[in-house]
Structure formats: structure tokens, C-alpha cells
Amino acid sequence: MDKEKISLSVLTKGIIKENPVLVLILGTCPTLAVTTLAVNGIGMGLAATFVLVCSNIVISLLKNVIPDKVRIPCYIVIIAGFVTILSSLLEAFFPSIYSALGLFLQLIVVNCIILGRAEMFASKNGVVASALDGLGMGLGFTLALLMIGSIREILGAGTWFGIPLTVNLFSPISIFILAPGGFFVYGCVIALVNKLTKGRAIKKKDFSCEGCPSAGACGSCSGCSAEKGENK
């Protein structure tokens, strides 16, 4: 029963509590770039989910083999392999999505969400937990992109997944499919999540040096400097 609770917690935390886009504020560049249409948001989200799950599994399997000094380059090679496979599959079977995602599909290789989960979770946990973590984070990423993309498409183009919705209601507001509209919608959705969770979703300590894997080697923050001073 305890294992089931732990598994469920690992799977669901990426949806709201640690949503990579709306709480941890990661992957902002692809989020703003591809969410002009809802279908593009789903495409990017599912692509990132595939890479997250696969790379987390492989990195978890190899965590005791990969030398610590070259772990980041090794993670990037593993992630790049899955991105290459995904790009080839999309180009062959879903060319419209491949074209819509464009360069941002290849940039999944250096997406901070993927690298972050590899460093913070997959390299320290078992295969099943790592797979669930990747799936949960991917679902949270996909849902966030779908929400932002839906709002921008409905307000900016008057459609949703290509279906006209606002023909007799109002004229499309084109700024919402441009960069300023993207930033505005993104900020509003983050504020909405913060309001609905009464601020509980955002933990200030998650953004401090306390949660950084390099905190011990960093002398720039006051906490680390004080700790080093005490040790001396």
C-alpha cells in the first residue's frame, strides 16, 4: 500500500504540485513558441513526454555505470538519441506536426525539464519511479501547453483545433497568437494556478540554493558562504 502511494505521488506531482511550466517555470521558450495552436501544444507535450520517459528509464538503468564527472554529457547523448528517433518518426508519419514544431523539436535535447529530471531524479532513483516521474512531468507539461495553446488559439484565431468557435461572438484578437499575447496568457495561467492552490503549489525553497545539486560547491550564496565559514 505504501509503495502504491509513493508511485501515485511520483506520477501526480508533475501535474500541479511541481508542474514544470506553471510552478517550476521551466521550458518557457518552447511553451511560448509552439502554443499558437492547441494541436501544436499537444504535439510538443507528447514529444517531450516520450523523451522524458525513455531517457529517465535509460539513465536510471545506467546511473551506476556513468562516471560522475561526465554525467551531463552522457545524459545529453542519451536524450539526443531519443530525440533523433522521435524526429524521424514524426517526419515520416506526422509531417504536419514535424513542420509545426520545427527547430523546437530538436531543442528538446537541451530542454531544462528533460535534463533537470535526469539530474535530480532519474540518476538517484529506480527504473519504475523514474519512468513514473517522466510520465508525470510530461503530462503536466502537455496539459500546461494545451491550456495555454487553447486560450491563445480561441482568442487569437477564433478556432479550437481548427473548429470555428467565435464566428458570431467576436472577431479574433490577433495579438494573442503573437509573442506579447503569449507572455500575457502565460502569466495569467500561472496566476490562476497560484490562486486556485492558494499559493501552496509554489514552494519558495524549491527556487533557493537549498535545492540545487551544486549548492555545496557554490560560494555565491550567503547560506553556502556562511556554512563554509563555520566549517573553517
Image: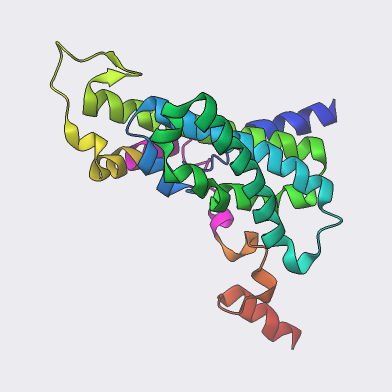
- State whether the magenta stretch is mostly helix, strand or loop: helix
Rendered residue at 14%/10% (across/down)? 168
Instruction: Give the quarter of the figure containing the C terminus.
Output: bottom right
Extent of the magenta region: 187-207
**The quarter of the displayed image where residue 85 is located:** top right
Q: Position of residue 27 (x, y in %)?
A: 48, 47
Q: Position of residue 214 (x, y in %)?
A: 66, 68
Q: Position of residue 137 (x, y in %)?
A: 60, 37
Instruction: Give the side of residue 84 with respect to residue 45, left or right.
Output: right
Work out which residue is located at the far bottom of the displayed protein and give it. 232
Work out which residue is located at the far front of the displayed protein and give it. 92
Residue 135 position (above or below residue 227):
above
Residue 166 position (above or below residue 157):
above
Instruction: Give the side of residue 34 with respect to residue 158, left or right.
Output: right
Q: Nearer the viewer, residue 135 or 206?
A: 135
Q: Is residue 13 visible?
A: no
Rendered residue at 71%/33% (across/down)? 132
Residue 150 position (above or below residue 74):
above
Queried whether the magenta region covers residue 194, the answer comes back as yes
Q: Nearer the viewer, residue 48 or 93?
A: 93
**The quarter of the displayed image where residue 159 is located:** top left
**The quarter of the displayed image where residue 178 is located:** top left
